[in-house]
Image (spheres, coloured by chain):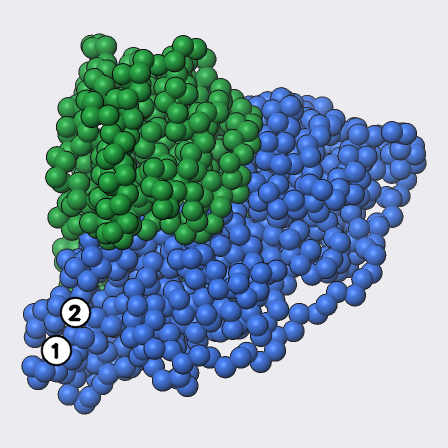
Chain colours: A green, B blue
Amino acid sequence: MPALPDGLVQSLEDVATRLRIESIRATTAAGSGHPTSSASAADLVAAIFFATMRFDPTEPRAPAGDRFVLSKGHAAPVLYAAWAELGVVKREELTTLRELTSDLEGHPTPRLPFVDVATGSLGQGLSVGVGLARGARMLGSDARVFVLLGDGETAEGSVWEAAQMAGHDRVANLVAVVDVNALGQSGPTMLGHDLRAYQRRFAAFGWRAVTIDGHDFNQIVPALRRARASRQAPTAIIARTIKGQGIAEVAGREGWHGKALPADAAERAIKALEAKLHHVPPPPVHKPTRRKLPSLQAQPAPAAPTYGEIATREAYGDALVRLGTADPRVVALDGDVKNSTYAERFLAAHPDRFVEAYIAEQNMVGAAAGLAAQGFVPFASSFACFLTRAADQLRMAAISRSNVKLCGSHAGVSIGEDGPSQMALEDLALFRALPEAVVLYPSDGVSTDACVQLAALHRGMVYIRTTRMKTPVVYGADEAFAVGGLKVVRSTDADVLTIVGAGVTLHEALAAHDELAGGGVRVRVIDLYSVKPVDAAGLLAAARATRNRLLVVEDHYAEGGLADAVREAVASEAITVHHLAVREIPHSGPPKKLLERYGIGRGAIVAKVREIG
Amino acid sequence: MPALPDGLVQSLEDVATRLRIESIRATTAAGSGHPTSSASAADLVAAIFFATMRFDPTEPRAPAGDRFVLSKGHAAPVLYAAWAELGVVKREELTTLRELTSDLEGHPTPRLPFVDVATGSLGQGLSVGVGLARGARMLGSDARVFVLLGDGETAEGSVWEAAQMAGHDRVANLVAVVDVNALGQSGPTMLGHDLRAYQRRFAAFGWRAVTIDGHDFNQIVPALRRARASRQAPTAIIARTIKGQGIAEVAGREGWHGKALPADAAERAIKALEAKLHHVPPPPVHKPTRRKLPSLQAQPAPAAPTYGEIATREAYGDALVRLGTADPRVVALDGDVKNSTYAERFLAAHPDRFVEAYIAEQNMVGAAAGLAAQGFVPFASSFACFLTRAADQLRMAAISRSNVKLCGSHAGVSIGEDGPSQMALEDLALFRALPEAVVLYPSDGVSTDACVQLAALHRGMVYIRTTRMKTPVVYGADEAFAVGGLKVVRSTDADVLTIVGAGVTLHEALAAHDELAGGGVRVRVIDLYSVKPVDAAGLLAAARATRNRLLVVEDHYAEGGLADAVREAVASEAITVHHLAVREIPHSGPPKKLLERYGIGRGAIVAKVREIG
């Protein structure tokens, strides 16, 4: 391998030196942040942006362009400095780092046009990279995706879930660069500078893995360029680096994670770095080969089928197929339960837009966020309880305002014999607490179909909760649904109370309604299919009309679900909210028996209404 | 390696045949369940229990005895059949599988004495095994831990987090047996029967890894015995198996995951299996070498320090040290943030009871559950937002009624400049929704110390939420706290409203109280340090005394936290609950500015009280 031209090396050295200077300056100005983690990565970042990637800095989200994901989000200063070097961020803005009015936050967020997803919870960037890379391929783009990881974060299992998918599916347009500076936050990393150990792991997961000196451009650039050219397998570049490289007083020293340099030390460091400058301009950025990529335009959807008795999980599968026929942006992801969630129907209909994520829910959600960042509308589904496995990825997707859709099947005790490990009873609490997330919980085929279409139309995260057991049809085919809506399903002027249900408990409430009506007791029944946002006005109107009394029934633990949503909505008025929910760890058993045993079945509802009087 | 004695092989073959027969019989009786996944593992299970483990079946949780964890929990029938073979479960009980009144649930739970933790959410057993194995070592026991994994579940990153800890810390008394039957739920696994691929992965993570035929006792037993004798590294036994082995009509066939055989097919299969029986008794169980293990008895704790202004996270570290001095059962686990959570103080004081889990929170929580199952009282800490990474492990620990304690630091927007990725704003929603979990949220050094002691005394999961910033002392050194308690911190007979805060918002409420009092407006202030269970009577009494008005202020998103807990508690009466919470995705910035910017600081509280009037 011939050495790089001296001019290029000097130019890259200058870029890296400036990245270090700006990282020190910004963090010292902020009084906090990560100059040492930025410094270890500075040469790698310089080489990725200025000697490898093909992209247009003015169109960072164009599918034709290479993407960069800073998985080690705490090195945000070096990212911001790189985009200043590219002319996208004003250099004087860099010292507004971490200020309330600056978009240069402590860890990167997509408030910035060149950030696809928020990072800062470690170990998530590679999954996003897999999604971006697969998305590029689906679009017919030959763009590559570069993900910079810290060594410490490879301890997260999610990294190996992502590595596994990339290796198994030969995602050759993905490049992981691991910044092995050997120091974590609170001490040395597990593997220190044992580059071979990292190499063995990536190789074992199906990657081409190479080791380099992460401060030698004559090793960095050729490794990156070979990786960019790979057609067979994803490439991992394991780079030996020094934390704080270029800052003599802290380089390679413990105790300097996440600390800004004091002003005097910063001044000394900057002076020393400035003395190293060759004062040459940065290398020109390589633009992508312009390629006309197909634009993804939604067509009118085929007519909805006529739904009869059907499990909402099955209606989900059918609706997704229909949606996918109309909208080429729709992709589906599965965690090896596609025959239970009915995502398998999408696989059969649209195989080239189906991603099998196997039993690795964290990566499934991370990859979905990556696909969303390429303009797709990903629907990821699993048992609702197993989506909790990806709670932190969901949290970060919410912070990213990612356009991901989740479907959790097999909610609640109504799944029956499989027992508590398979019952989602806290999923509503999880999704309600995610900022800006929409939570939908349909009860029949018609409303499920509507919820799937609503999810696709809504820009942002949507969660759809489905049920294992079959349920009868409630709505006519032309019934209209809306995010933030509810349906008054039964009502008379003589109603003494309103029962609020959703999903399976709507059907229990309807059965209870009929039994009570037989005894001359009239109750109103509301289908709260939009759990978040919730129709407060609709709930208040029903409560006022029924003696200010609501009874919420939910197949969920008592905390964080339907009742909390309802109480929040009506808190401004003196409404009494009664509540039936699962209040103990449930047991295996037949679904109908469990609904009654845990106090949310028709019998329990009738008894509760009679008790309320 | 000489062949095993024919008698032993025949005896093991009979055990395995009976395990298959009982698995078929039980699942067919139940009408659901996993006979094929049980059948693939039957020979492995027979060899583990009857030719390898040293344990006393009548004392399955004795620290001197080897342990077995069925990570692939859906193979529950084979586990129950094994314990029937051991005489612990009555054979006639096996066909009560999955019934509401039977402890033989669809997936194993610790309602059964021989189950340490609930399994059924895949990929979690190896972490529990690491905890059990490390716990045995800490107790001076030479017991081993055997974990049976499915091949499909190795797709979960948590498996590699566990593998990594075991490899790095040379947990040689841990044996993983991977049942490679090549079929997942909805299709073939990623790696099929590529045993070498599994071997490479475990080897890359520091394990001794061997491949065997999982249906040949002459390969299974020697591999297990060598693994049991390992002193250097954990051992992974990668076993090639056939899903449904021994059941001719379904063996190796797709489409038979999680399906009971129809009655006629079951009858044919059982008949064919019975024909294979040699009719010899099972091999005798090897009892453990009896060893007197030190009994862990708590001593009186050293006196609490006198707390002044201190961050509750720091007080947590000090309290944990004090607790650890008194109680040898207390261990601490960290996710490489011990210098932020102050768990590092426990490391300094009690290094032999400290487990560094690095940046791998799922395994940290799983290992904690394993340690708890050995009788320890584990305290696992990280940033509160990163505990969400382990949401599914926490869910399973709750179902297991595991005696684990979690501490989440850096809660809320009050952490400041690091930005939203590091701010826990949904952790209360997560922990409140876990069944039987206790949630404590102290506000000063004294209450933090008390919460740590309360957590240790409480049998079951406890979550403690701590704050990054320093807060002044609120309580005298002898103040008493209780799970389910609250404190009325300010009160007069003229109070017009009660402000409910906790943690950092208690201090904001106190400041608001003083400012309002200066203007002649009297408000009551409650410290709701016990978020779950919540003192409903105390809240109702305060509300009634203050014009039926509460104002809840929390450094958390609006859903699932303090206000939901308060509204649930007072729902039976006509109490108006006002609410200040974080209602948008927050930004980086200085802590005090963020508290006001997001409407939960003293200024916002004063304004809200004046608005309420």
Please tell me which residue lies in front, A271 or A298: A271
- Dot 2 corresponds to which residue? B602
The location of residue A203, given as percent across then percent down, is 53, 24
> Tag 1's secondary structure?
helix
Image position of B558 with respect to A153: above or below? below
> Tag 2's secondary structure?
helix
Residue B612 seen by the camera? no
At a point 25% along the width and 22% down the height, the residue shown is A11
Task: Say which amino acid is labelled 1.
Answer: Glu
The location of residue B173, given as percent across then percent down, is 71, 47
Image position of A356 with respect to B345: above or below? above
Labelled disc at residue B73: none
Task: Estimate the spatial distance between the alpha carbons at disc 2 and disc 1, rounded to whole Å.
Answer: 9 Å
At a point 59% along the width and 40% down the height, the residue shown is B163
Quarter assignment of residue A75: top left
Please tell me which residue lies in front, B576 or A169: A169
At a point 39% along the width and 19% down the height, the residue shown is A218
Q: Quadrant of the N terminus of chain A?
A: top left
Image position of A272 with respect to B214: above or below? below
At a point 43% along the width and 42% down the height, the residue shown is A252
Image position of B549 with respect to A306: above or below? below
The location of residue B608, given as percent across then percent down, is 11, 68
- Tell me which numbered mark, 2 or 1, is placed earlier along the sequence: 1
Please tell me which residue lies in front, B477 or A152: A152
The location of residue B593, given as percent across then percent down, is 16, 59
Task: Say which amino acid is labelled 2.
Answer: Arg
- Dot 1 corresponds to which residue? B515
